[in-house]
């Protein structure tokens, strides 16, 4: 039976590795949004065997998300909200005036899912690519300077008000970690609200060198992240590769690997205890209300 999956951030890293793996499944149609139309041509050449659609979607612009459409005839069996960005040494704001990590990693994906919900099949599987950086007790994340998510009021997160950060570099780490915490909270909140058979989860792919996540961190660090660190990443506990992390993720999205609704799981299949605010239900509802206001 034919299925349709939608994956954001499929032009590189984990998303591209996942698209490669899923493209081997018979009858699967992949919707892979791209930021620029030129990228669509490259993506089609990178996935010559895949049946794909490549609509334009710029997650850094809320108007682009609001305009995004898929065919009325398409029913989505799985969605992975995977695209992500992390700023480096300068504070970056989107054209909408928001801190970039919050805007792209959380808000744009929240609004996209709201738009796609009428197209979800009754048993659809929806996932967020999260990160151990949101957990202040994650040793690997701490080694890279991350101190965990800050569950500030949503308005403060949107404006990047990390007053305890000593500099822009740490503020950007805090913003990224916080956005990944919001991804985990979103999966759990949507699961609690679900009254049917749809499943929601958050996925920690591990430390994945070789991706485009360091693209804003300067030429030297970006090169080291993409080409040097992958060669030594096996020495790091909690490190993986896009191909390695895509393996289990493909099985989850295709329904082969079952998870409890709202689960937070890593690339080994281990279900993790997330770092969440003490008043999780109230905070998640406030976050949802704030985010819905931008529809």
Image (cartoon, grey):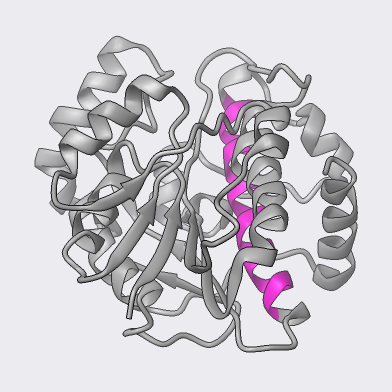
Residue 275 location (% of width, % of height): 63, 65
Residue 109 location (% of width, % of height): 63, 47
The residue sitting at 29% across, 41% down in the picture is: 13
Work out whether residue 28 or residue 212 is closer to the camera in this orientation and state it: 28
Residue found at the far left of this picture: 231
Residue 181 location (% of width, % of height): 63, 55
Work out whether residue 229 or residue 180 is closer to the camera in this orientation and state it: 180
Work out whether residue 283 or residue 114 is closer to the camera in this orientation and state it: 114
Relative vertical location of residue 248 with respect to residue 138 in this rendering, above or below: below
The residue sitting at 41% across, 65% down in the picture is: 4
Q: Main secondary structure of the magenta part?
A: helix
The residue sitting at 48% across, 54% down in the picture is: 131
The residue sitting at 77% across, 21% down in the picture is: 96
Residue 84 location (% of width, % of height): 49, 39
Residue 115 drawn in magenta: no
The answer to which quarter of the image holds residue 265 is bottom left
Q: Is residue 123 visible?
A: yes
Residue 173 drawn in magenta: yes
The answer to which quarter of the image holds residue 216 is top left
Q: Which residues are magenta?
A: 170-191
């Amino acid at each position: 039976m034919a299925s349709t999956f939608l994956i954001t951030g499929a032009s590189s890293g984990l998303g591209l590795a996942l698209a490669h793996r899923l493209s081997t499944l018979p009858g699967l149609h992949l919707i892979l949004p791209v930021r620029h139309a030129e990228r669509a041509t490259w993506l089609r050449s990178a996935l010559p065997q895949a049946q794909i659609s490549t609509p334009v979607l710029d997650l850094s612009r809320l108007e682009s998300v609001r305009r995004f459409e898929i065919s009325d005839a398409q029913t989505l069996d799985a969605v992975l909200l995977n695209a992500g960005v992390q700023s480096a040494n300068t504070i970056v704001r989107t054209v909408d005036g928001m801190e970039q990590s919050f805007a792209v990693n959380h808000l744009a994906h929240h609004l996209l899912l709201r738009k796609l919900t009428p197209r979800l099949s009754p048993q659809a599987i929806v996932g967020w690519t999260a990160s151990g950086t949101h957990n202040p007790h994650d040793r690997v994340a701490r080694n890279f300077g991350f101190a965990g998510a800050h569950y500030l009021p949503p308005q403060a997160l949107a404006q990047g008000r990390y007053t305890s950060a000593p500099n822009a570099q740490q503020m950007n780490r805090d913003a990224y970690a916080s956005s990944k915490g919001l991804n985990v909270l979103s999966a759990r909140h949507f699961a609690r609200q679900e009254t049917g058979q749809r499943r929601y989860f958050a996925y920690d792919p591990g430390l994945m060198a070789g991706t485009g996540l360091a693209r804003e961190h300067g030429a030297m660090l970006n090169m080291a992240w993409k080409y040097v660190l992958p060669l030594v990443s096996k020495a790091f506990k909690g490190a993986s590769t896009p191909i390695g992390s895509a393996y289990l993720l493909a099985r989850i999205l295709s329904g082969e690997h079952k998870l409890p609704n709202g689960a937070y799981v890593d690339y080994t299949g281990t279900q993790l205890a997330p770092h969440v605010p003490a008043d999780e239900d109230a905070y998640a509802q406030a976050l949802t209300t704030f985010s819905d206001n931008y529809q």
